[in-house]
Structures are given as structure tokens and as C-alpha cells.
Amino acid sequence: MTARSKFWLITLSALLAIAVTLALGRWQLSRAAQKQAVQASIDEKTGSPPLSGPALASLPDPAQEMYRGVSLRGRWLAERTVFLDNRPMNGKPGLYVVTPMKLEGGEAVILVQRGWAARNFVDRTSVPTLDTPAGVVEIQGRIVPPLSKLYELGGTETGLIRQNLDIAQFRAETGLPLLAVWVQQTGAASEGLLREWPLARTGVDKNYGYAFQWFGLSGLIVILYVWFQIVRRFIYPKRA
């Protein structure tokens, strides 16, 4: 291969690498813009006045009000409580406690993520003792997406301790008129449960970080090309 052919091969390779890294950087910026829009919507819903139980029950599409606050009055259906396994909080493994609440003033029932409890690793069949108030209670919370589904063996799970909980399946199992929406109870620890839920964040900073890396790599390719193919040839023509 002649020196001229080698020069053009290196040039074309550098141009291709620069084009690819710039495109990847711009793509990360576009993803960041999308996530910013989603985060703005989350922040807007979080700052909106909380919905009452009747208002929540009348929502045609609860997903449109995701992360909005709610103020619910009703009765716990404690006998239908389910403990979801392998759900960490603050880095510790444990159980999410989910209890249906029958909303006051109607027949609607909603699943509430009441909080987190530590797991008994000595007797894995045991569940924590909860202080579930009887009678009408009032709780504060927010509308949240369905819990992430964990890997499970076999078919649909039943029993107190489960890996996953699907509203439609639980509705068929219990016969309860469950609304197609999840509520996460907020507030200080009580009833033997922690409620230090992670904040809803879209992770836009990661995309900016990735974009910086791609643009930085693109700049590095330019610097190396200029040095080895232009500056070095000018300073050390015989070595080039």
C-alpha cells in the first residue's frame, strides 16, 4: 500500500468514526430531551392537588394521572393482604405489603402498596405481624406504575407470599371489584412498615454523561488525526 493510499484510508476511517460518534452523541441528547419532558410531566403531576377516592375511581385512564397524589378514605381488607418477596428498600431485601382498600362511599376497591417490611430468613414461610387498623382510615399516597415483574417458576402464584401481583389476575382470584390502578402509600413509618420509596426520576443525567463521552471521543479522534496526519508530517516529514 502506498503512502498516499494509506493516508486516504486513515482519513476515511477517521471521518467515519467522527460521524458515528457525533451521531451517537446527538442521539443521547435527543433521549435526554425526551426524558426531560417525561420528568416535567411527573413533576407537574406531583405538584397537583391530590385526588379523592371518588375522583380516583372515576378516572377513565389512571395512567394519565401517574404520580399524582391521592387522599383516600376507606377500610382495609386485611384478610386479602399479599406480601411481595424480593423487594428491597434502602439496599435491604424484604417484602412489599399490598392490601386492598374498599373506598368509602362506593364499592370500588384499590390495591395499596402500604410499605416495606423485613423478611424472616430463618422461616421463609412466616410473614411479619402488621398493625392494620380496623374501621375507616384515611391515607395519603400517589398513583404509581405497576410493580416490576420478577422471574417466577410455574404458573400464577397464590398465597400470602408471592413474587408478583397482577391486578386482573387478583381480581379474578378474589372477586373484588379492583380498580385498574396502583396506589403507593406515603408518609412516615407506621404499622410496622417503612415507606422510604425511591423518587421518580427518569435518569436524564446518564444520557448527558453518555453524550459527553461520545462527543469527547469524537474530539479525541479529531485531535489524533490532526496530530499524526498533519502536524507530525509537517514537523517530521521524513518520519511520516
Image: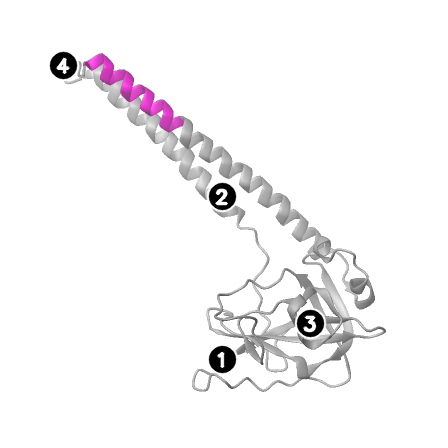
Specify which label sits upstream in the sequence, 4 or 3.
Answer: 3
User: In what element is the residue under mark 3?
Assistant: helix
Nearest-to-viewer mark from 1 and 4: 1
Q: Are marks 1 and 2 in contact (CB under 8 Å)?
A: no
Percent position of residue 38, x then y = 63, 47
Q: Quadrant of residue 194?
A: bottom right
Query: For the residues marked 4 and 3, what is the alpha-carbon distance in whole angstroms?
Result: 82 Å
Report the mark closest to the observer, 1 or 2.
Answer: 1
Q: Which residue is mark 1?
A: 119
Residue 186, located in which quarter of the rendered image? bottom right
Please report the residue visible at 82 percent of the width from the left and 61 percent of the height from the top: 58
Q: How is the image coloured?
A: one colour
Disc number lying in front (2 or 4): 2
Which residue is labeled 2 in the image? 207
Q: Secondary structure at mark 4?
A: loop
Rate crowding at label 1 as few (under 14), some (14 to 19) or many (20 or more) other CA atoms within 10 Å: many
Disc 3 marks which residue? 172
In the picture, residue 200 is in which quadrant? bottom right
